[in-house]
Image (spheres, coloured by chain):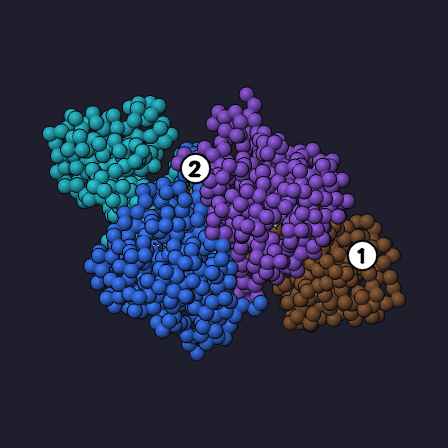
Chain colours: A brown, B cyan, C blue, D purple
Amino acid sequence: MTKPTCEDTLVVKKRDLKNDYFSLVLAPFSGAKSIKPGQFVHIRLPSTEIYFRRAFSVASVNPVKKEVEIIFKVFGRGTKILGKMRKGDSLDLLGPLGVPFSFPNKKERAVIVAGGVGFPPLMFLAEKMIERGHNPKQIEFFYGGRSKTELVELSRLKKMGIKLHLSTDDGSAGTKGLVIGPVEKYLKKHLNEKLKLFGCGPEKMLKAVDELGLKYDIKGQLALEALMPCGVGICLGCVVPLKAGGFARVCCDGPVFEIGVVNIAC
Amino acid sequence: MTKPTCEDTLVVKKRDLKNDYFSLVLAPFSGAKSIKPGQFVHIRLPSTEIYFRRAFSVASVNPVKKEVEIIFKVFGRGTKILGKMRKGDSLDLLGPLGVPFSFPNKKERAVIVAGGVGFPPLMFLAEKMIERGHNPKQIEFFYGGRSKTELVELSRLKKMGIKLHLSTDDGSAGTKGLVIGPVEKYLKKHLNEKLKLFGCGPEKMLKAVDELGLKYDIKGQLALEALMPCGVGICLGCVVPLKAGGFARVCCDGPVFEIGVVNIAC
Amino acid sequence: MPVDLKCKIAGVEFANPIMTASGCAGYGEELAQIYPLSNLGALVTKSISLKVRPGYPPPRTVETPGGLLNAIGLANVGIDRFLNEKVPFLEQQKTKVIVNVAGSTIDEYVEVCSRLNDCSCADMIELNISCPNVNEGGIEFGTSPKLTEKTVAAARKVFKRPIIAKLAPNVTSIVEIAKAAEQGGADALSIINSVIGTAVDIDSWKPLLANINGGLTGPAIKPIALAMVSGVYRKCKLPIIGIGGITDYKDVIEYLLYGATAVQVGTALFVDPSAPLKIVKGLKKYLKEKKLKSVTELIGKVRR
Amino acid sequence: MPVDLKCKIAGVEFANPIMTASGCAGYGEELAQIYPLSNLGALVTKSISLKVRPGYPPPRTVETPGGLLNAIGLANVGIDRFLNEKVPFLEQQKTKVIVNVAGSTIDEYVEVCSRLNDCSCADMIELNISCPNVNEGGIEFGTSPKLTEKTVAAARKVFKRPIIAKLAPNVTSIVEIAKAAEQGGADALSIINSVIGTAVDIDSWKPLLANINGGLTGPAIKPIALAMVSGVYRKCKLPIIGIGGITDYKDVIEYLLYGATAVQVGTALFVDPSAPLKIVKGLKKYLKEKKLKSVTELIGKVRR
Ligand SMILES: Cc1cc2nc3c(=O)[nH]c(=O)nc-3n(C[C@H](O)[C@H](O)[C@H](O)COP(=O)(O)OP(=O)(O)OC[C@H]3O[C@@H](n4cnc5c(N)ncnc54)[C@H](O)[C@@H]3O)c2cc1C
Ligand SMILES: Cc1cc2nc3c(=O)[nH]c(=O)nc-3n(C[C@H](O)[C@H](O)[C@H](O)COP(=O)(O)OP(=O)(O)OC[C@H]3O[C@@H](n4cnc5c(N)ncnc54)[C@H](O)[C@@H]3O)c2cc1C
Ligand SMILES: Cc1cc2nc3c(=O)[nH]c(=O)nc-3n(C[C@H](O)[C@H](O)[C@H](O)COP(=O)(O)O)c2cc1C
Ligand SMILES: Cc1cc2nc3c(=O)[nH]c(=O)nc-3n(C[C@H](O)[C@H](O)[C@H](O)COP(=O)(O)O)c2cc1C
Ligand code: FES
Ligand code: FES
């Protein structure tokens, strides 16, 4: 693990994606270049109203400019404040934290399953895979949300040349229904290939991906979320139960876990 | 007393006076037109970081536009936030609160003693007196501060045509030394006239004005400050001891008290 | 369908479960200038003692993270002036009135309670047993089960309408104190009074309260109060009035779920005197959303 | 002239009065990745019990106004794995190590303490007596003066270096518990552990902690902890380590003025793992400004 650093950074770019989604680019962060997909930064909000930090997966980095991008949806008190930040405002960042995804072998086909606000680390994963020489056509990116407006950064994903499969609960874009349907269909068709699953999103979705992995004996990894008071492993507040018994800390034993390891609650 | 109202208002004008002093104009406040000099508004800061309201004397009102002006100096946590407010931001106002100054008889000469950030209610008093027909030349406005940069809104005060006597501790403007020196000198010279004292400022200054009033048998009023959890008389947190024994609430028995009544602590 | 906010404690019916907490609304006069008191479930008065009490010298309050420290010193007009000056006003208000009573000896409690028995305006009394007992070296009545029972029993003898015992949180077992109050004849329990705390100025090295120690109140203490309400609800049958850190309707629901029948709003009144009105609105909306008919359906419904 | 931050408790000298609080820094490994532990006055370990404890299921934490509610359930590796896996690391750190010990019977405390006696890495132990006693129906050791004295005395017999008793705030008289600990042979007192609290989700009606009740910590409890430190300082001679809500150097000064010799930082580490470093800097600056030579000149100097 790389030593996390704690630094004041500036908002150098803010984009208002639609429907309460925002992208913030923060810089300079000296830890930027060492950040790997799946890792997160722990952000202190500039208000003592919110005492604890909030965790955000890194969505992209620019190692030269030492930039870190996060993409989030306004959800509660903390993300509300974050959504009001303006260019030039400063934010205290602690990171990089957590265990990243392991890159799949270049011959493997990556089946990526993103639910709602779980897509940023997976977009980062796909980007880095391509950078490392993975064929974009070997990346199947399933992206599901409640409705069309909940799917953001589509043009960015399309530009990557990956195979994008959209789905929405209400059918307003892509396949109608939960993302997991098209995923299972796809897996069944390609069981003879070397596949690797990657998932991040709501717990229900993660549980379903976990079950698919076990059912079809496909290895892979899931990025989990939890309430994280510290983010660095010292409070034991963020644990999830393991199937083998006992608990693991999402912040430092995860957030990325192998399929089949965590007992995902819903 | 007028019934206080509690309303969301907007910052319609912000002026950065120098040296951490700011003026904010808030509107529309339906209680605006009934506000009298010496009364204050209790402001809820748009941050749950600051749980309790902060009290500010009203510095002027525009009854037609329903505007209320406050002038403050960045001092602690709350005023820091207030100093960062921008035009268009909203602020929750409770007021008008407190007992106002009684206007002096038009034949009386008003000797007004303002110390530092105590000047806004006194400026409002002078303005209203003139509006009511008091001869500006019958208003002696003593205004003291640590140094030149601590005296603000001088051109505004000058425009009123009142007799302005400045003093600074370091002599950088007006008479050198505490404001109370020139005041006593003035009183001694004019003991044969009908005088009325008005004071607002640091406790030490108020105590000195109180003593001058008693020494030369000049009636008058002092506007006090206190930590005010509620501002409406229900918490009993803001009390000051009375010379006659017992306590009075600064927020609703004051903030304006007759000279000789309060046992001012320093 | 309209939702029902009425609730009943010891036979007394309240328009809604939102009361003002003692010491946080004076005798009602100031709030009545802002809105009709009929909006309240009940007005609870400042603690009334036998003699007038000027209270402690200032500074009396300190702002702390999420809370307020106060050392007012039970400043109040005393029972005589209360009956003469405050009751006539309270009688005109269309709200239930709960008179909070303080004393430094059991005799003082008894005297004040018997005077209130003749004052029909006092629908109930609430005994503030977080007062130092001068006959027992200054220990608080409410920290001793025996003294708690004795005090409540003594008040019980002279006051014929319902009695609420208001418990202090600064004890090893609030359940034990609750049971003592029940034993003494209390009809209901108010839980909790303020938590002992202090603060000091690091420049002058002087305590920030003239009395040094004070009572911590406000949102900071809500988790503490909730745990106490929850504990007592499971071990004691008396109806509970939950107090501590209530700012909005969500806080009220937490108290009800843990077993409170009604609540009192204290410190939040200082920030927003109209808080009770907003809470009532919020409660109605919540009940509608949850398709509940009556606020009483929430009582004790936490899913353990 | 350089200012002196050194302080001494029961003969053990600390580079500065800033320690990490038990359960808030694990066994030091994670913090050591961020800065050398030699910056700390001492590292206090998570509570070590005889057997490994997985802890309670999630959710284990809730954010509250100015604080944190936690119900971790004393999750720890147990004494065996502590000695085998954690001590080798701790031995290499240039800081004092205080091992916090938990038990559910006196025998368990004794067993863990005697194992630690042979481990020179443990400069001191801190007895966490806020644990339920399984032999006494689950009442906490630390709520009973008798059990407190017994537990400390039993540990005293087997552990030859200094013993700190860590007191729980959920008692009627912390002074009484402090005296019992002194009687049992404690060399110092840590004041306070977390305050019992709870919270519930108003949508699901489920408690926000799987264990229902938890411990309230963070800035919200600072006034409460300060009052307890202040009370014990005046009635008991043992040196005090102040704990509760310390976020910056100003909080530390408040504790020292009220009588603490050193302090522990807990919850604030979660927000800023480097808080102790910033506090040390702040303390130095303050001492210079106040023209004080040593941090010990502040102890107990509140102007009453
Ligand atoms: C490793 C990790 C990576 C994350 N990456 C992203 C990301 O890239 N983009 C993004 O939008 N969000 C991300 N999140 C979630 C983000 O941290 C939460 O949205 C944020 O904590 C909510 O904070 P808030 O103050 O807005 O909500 P609050 O007002 O604090 O919370 C509202 C409610 O949500 C609950 N809650 C708060 N935080 C969480 C949480 N982390 N998980 C579940 N429930 C919670 C609270 O208990 C409360 O009941 C990530 C979380 C983790 C742990
Ligand atoms: C009736 C009244 C009228 C006022 N009018 C004005 C005005 O016109 N312009 C102006 O600049 N200020 C005025 N004040 C003072 C203003 O309310 C304080 O500056 C403000 O409360 C400080 O808040 P803060 O959050 O910035 O400081 P904080 O961070 O809250 O306080 C810093 C320190 O100052 C202390 N403190 C806070 N408030 C007060 C207070 N009211 N009196 C004494 N000590 C305090 C705190 O205890 C703390 O130790 C008035 C106060 C009152 C009571
Ligand atoms: C300024 C102040 C004065 C109080 N005075 C009394 C009192 O006289 N009698 C009493 O029983 N409780 C008194 N209390 C305690 C409150 O009634 C209530 O129990 C406590 O404040 C907790 O509720 P809160 O967090 O909503 O404020 C007082 C509280 C405050 C803040
Ligand atoms: C998550 C968490 C875990 C804790 N675990 C322990 C523990 O194992 N043993 C113990 O004695 N105290 C434990 N505590 C209490 C702290 O050591 C400390 O007494 C308390 O948090 C108050 O300090 P603070 O406000 O600085 O956090 C824990 C506190 C927290 C927040
Ligand atoms: S968030 Fe603290 S251990 Fe994971
Ligand atoms: S501020 Fe509450 S009574 Fe004056």
The disc at residue A136 is 1
- Left or right: residue C162 compared with residue A103: left
Q: Residues within 10 Å of mark 2 (few under 14, many from 20)?
A: some
Q: Amino acid at mark 1?
A: Pro
- Left or right: residue D213 compared with residue A196: left
State the residue at coordinates (53%, 65%).
D202
In depth, the one of C106 and B145 nearer the eye is C106
State the residue at coordinates (70%, 65%).
A205
Q: CA distance from mark 2 to mark 1?
A: 63 Å
For the C terminus of chain C, give its image quadrant: bottom right
Q: Amino acid at mark 2?
A: Asp
Instruction: Establish if B205 lies above or below C54.
Output: above
Residue B116 placement (x, y as % from top left)? 33, 34
Q: Which residue is mark 2?
A: C201
Instruction: Establish if C295 lies above or below A246.
Output: below
Does the beta carbon at disc 2 come under 8 Å from ligand 2? Answer: yes
